[in-house]
Amino acid sequence: MGRREELSDFQRGTVVGCHLCKKSVREISALLNLPRSTVSAVILKWKRGGITTALPRSGRPHKLKEEDRQVLEKVALENCLPSVEALTAEFQTASGANVSSRTVRRELHEMGFRGRVSTYGKSTGGEKAEAEADEDEAKVDVSRLDLRVGRIIAAQQLPDADGVYVQQVDIGEAVPRTVVSELAKHIPVDQMQNRMAVLLCNLKPAKTSGVLSQAAIVCASSPDGVEILDPPGGAAPGDRVTFQGFPGEPDKELNPKKKVWEQVQPDLHTDAQCVAAYKGAAFEVVGKGVCKAQTLSDSEIK
């Protein structure tokens, strides 16, 4: 099943208007002929930032197919299970899908489930606190980061910002992402063209020097200089960077308030052979090799 067409700003505004008129997610879904998950996502975006317009897509696509999401919704509604882990096991039995409990929790939140899985569509004053509590339960390690191989298609220096590049980067998506980096003082512009890199792809998009940046280039850094990490030979844009011993799906988007990157970054270093690692586990593209700095050994990674 293909991805649904993006909602228009008018449709998004209508969803929020219905919500303000005290209509439930189910009622809005039936009235506008939209999936409940879509309605919930629009309402959630509006609650978090007062936004109804469509923003550039970021993060990884849904782990589950639409038909699997429908099975998950049915299982959650029909079974009053004590935990997300128990619901995940029941869902795997019913659908045959193999996903983590973190993925199931994320999908349930986007469908409109809050707190315990039995409380579907009930809006309470503690809704936000319950959702944040669930996020806090997730272990903070490198698996929360969406690290992917990318190709810098083109880079140019911003004329009014000292040391700042704006790059267009292919990370295996339909459209390249715009990435702003402060690398102009460290790497010549000719070395930024058509080169491979490692990108952190689930940061919340933010403006830097007036330009919206949709990812970050991962580098080794020391007093001797800064070097972009090189993916292994044969790696292609969109390839996932993983870590042995740290399984799990990355967050769809890192919540700045949770400071996941800030907690993980101190344990990112290159080793004596310039191999990038987290707590001794190499940055690895499965079947293709590890990611390395060119010359910076025993250096921090930013």
Image (spheres, grey):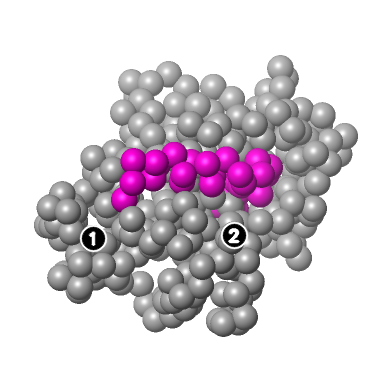
Q: Which residue lies at the image location 26% right of the left edge and 67% below the top edge? A: 26
The answer to whether residue 201 is seen in the rendering is no
Q: Nearer the viewer, residue 78 or 155?
A: 78
Place of residue 98 in the rendered image (x, y in percent of width and height, measured from the top left)? 63, 73
Q: Which amino acid does label 1 sit on?
A: Ser
Q: Name the residue under label 2.
A: 83
State the image quarter where residue 286 is shown.
bottom right
Q: In this view, does 302 lie to the left or right of 188?
A: right
Q: Which residue lies at the image location 64% right of the left edge and 31% below the top edge? A: 263
Q: Mark 1 points at which residue?
A: 24
Going from N to C along the chain, the mark reached first, 2 or 1, is 1
Q: How far apart are marks 2 and 1 (CA)?
A: 24 Å
Q: Residue 159 carries which label?
A: none
Q: What residue type is labelled 2?
A: Ser
Give, as a single range, the part of the protein colored magenta. Answer: 123-150
Q: Is residue 276 magenta?
A: no
What secondary structure is found at the residue carrying circle 2?
loop
